[in-house]
Image (tube, rainbow, N blue to C red):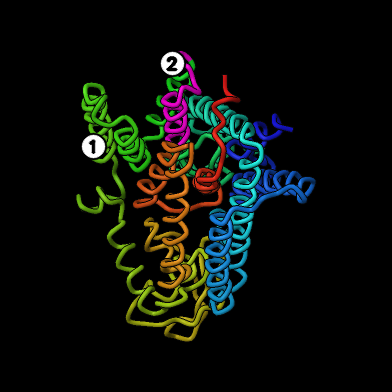
Amino acid sequence: MKYLYTLLLALSLILINPWGDNRGEIWTYPKVFAVLLITLLNLSILWTERFDLTIPKNWKISKLLWEIFLGIGLLSTLFSPFPLRSLFGQNEMGDGWLYWLLIAVFTLSNTLVLRHHPSILHFQINGLIIGGVILALSIFPQVINWKIDYTATSGQLLQDHILASTIFQTHQPIGLYSHRGHAAFVLAAVAVLAVTCWQKRWLSHRRLVIFLIPIILALLCTQNRAALLALIGTVIYQLGRKSYQFLIPAALVGLLVIGMNTTTRKIENLPLIKQVTSGRIYLGQLSGAGIVQRPLLGWGMNGFGIAYPYIFNPKWQPKIVHLGDFSFEYINKKGVIDRKAIATHKAHNLILDSCLSVGILGMACYLGLFGFSLWQVIQSPYRGMEAMAICYLIFTLTWFECAQFTHIFWWVLSFNKKLRSMNDFIK
């Protein structure tokens, strides 16, 4: 049973469906399915031991906060211009209301399982590290040949710079994800996990080096600045002043790499400030317009993609006929149905995306849930593991939540201060 956790946690990072017809079916749904299996495994254990379970007060508070957040999200979904999109989420992002319901059950059930079976955490950690190493190894062939995407149509082209799976050449190497940014965060998070386990003497120095070498090299190959910055900031938090002789040169090298990635990338000959921010300022302006229009409950889960058709032209409110995965149809000023591409489905900022999705009320509840959960981790015997949550927060300041990797964040936040230490179970 315990080794099943190792397998499922690894699959939650690397599972894909090579025969899928779109990005969701290829990369998102398989990973969500693995999270669902973990949740069902948790529930099966709790059901068999239901008469012996003790429910701590802190768990009940977490449950209440989740219920409030999901309640606000459900209201946002019901009043959304596209309630089905809010319910199921956009195809690739996958973070609709049903996904958040799954994450709530996953987090709460994992807390109780680890409380009664602390040795399971060892197997869950192994699964994440194994998955991270496999992900790292999957990236290197793509560095050599960008046409490799591990799908049934690998190598086939739609255009000279777009694969049949709709992956752009500029998005490679993607590893086992739909974008190199997604893969980069997972690599950074697993690296942080490995360092934390080494600090707690759960991982030998030799194994740490063996795991980190491919992971760091693969992360550098992705050239994702947000993940690199998240890793640098988190490692500084982890190691602190005691390791300043190592941290200062490492941080300088990391910042140099980020600077090189910024100055060498060319995005449609945009001005320097837009090159540096990748258009984030414009997305922030659009987000502000969307939040003003629906401040309390937002536009529904995955809100930016829903709001975009209504805010892309602030001087005119179009009548939307259809909202697709990559475009929307609307009635233009001439009364004719026209089509326009959706620039992006995310504002690339956790706070803006949350406000657009569930409004200010939902965002306040989300912050309360996160803050309480983080405090639980810090108060638990596993203090230090919160570094993975910090890595996620730094990353999502310029990126976003996605069903392909967000469960890693909530896995960490499933640690409760009432958990027992697993030091006796790790050799």
Nearest to the observer: residue 334 or residue 288: 288
Residue 225: % across, % down? 33, 40
Residue 270 seen in render = yes
As for residue 72 lying within the magenta part, the answer is: no
Answer whether labels 2 and 1 touch (C-beta < 8 Å). Answer: no
Residue 207: % across, % down? 49, 17
Residue 282: % across, % down? 30, 62
Q: Tally the marks.
A: 2
- Magenta span: predominant SS is helix
- State the residue at coordinates (25%, 53%): 274
The disc labelled 2 sits on which kind of residue?
His
Name the residue carrying label 2: 205
In the figure, is residue 16 to the left or right of 170? right
- State the residue at coordinates (46%, 32%): 193
Quadrant of the drawing holding the C terminus: top right
The disc labelled 1 sits on which kind of residue?
Gly
Residue 405 seen in render = no
In the rendered image, the vertical position of residue 344 relative to residue 356, given as above or below: above
Residue 387: % across, % down? 40, 39
- State the residue at coordinates (39%, 50%): 396
The quadrant in which residue 200 appears is top left
In the figure, is residue 25 to the left or right of 299? right
State which region is magenta: 187-206
Q: Which labelled disc corresponds to residue 259?
A: 1
Looking at the image, is mark 2 or mark 1 earlier in the sequence?
Answer: 2
In the rendered image, the vertical position of residue 119 relative to residue 328, given as above or below: above
In the rendered image, the vertical position of residue 65 relative to residue 250, given as above or below: below
As for residue 194 lying within the magenta part, the answer is: yes
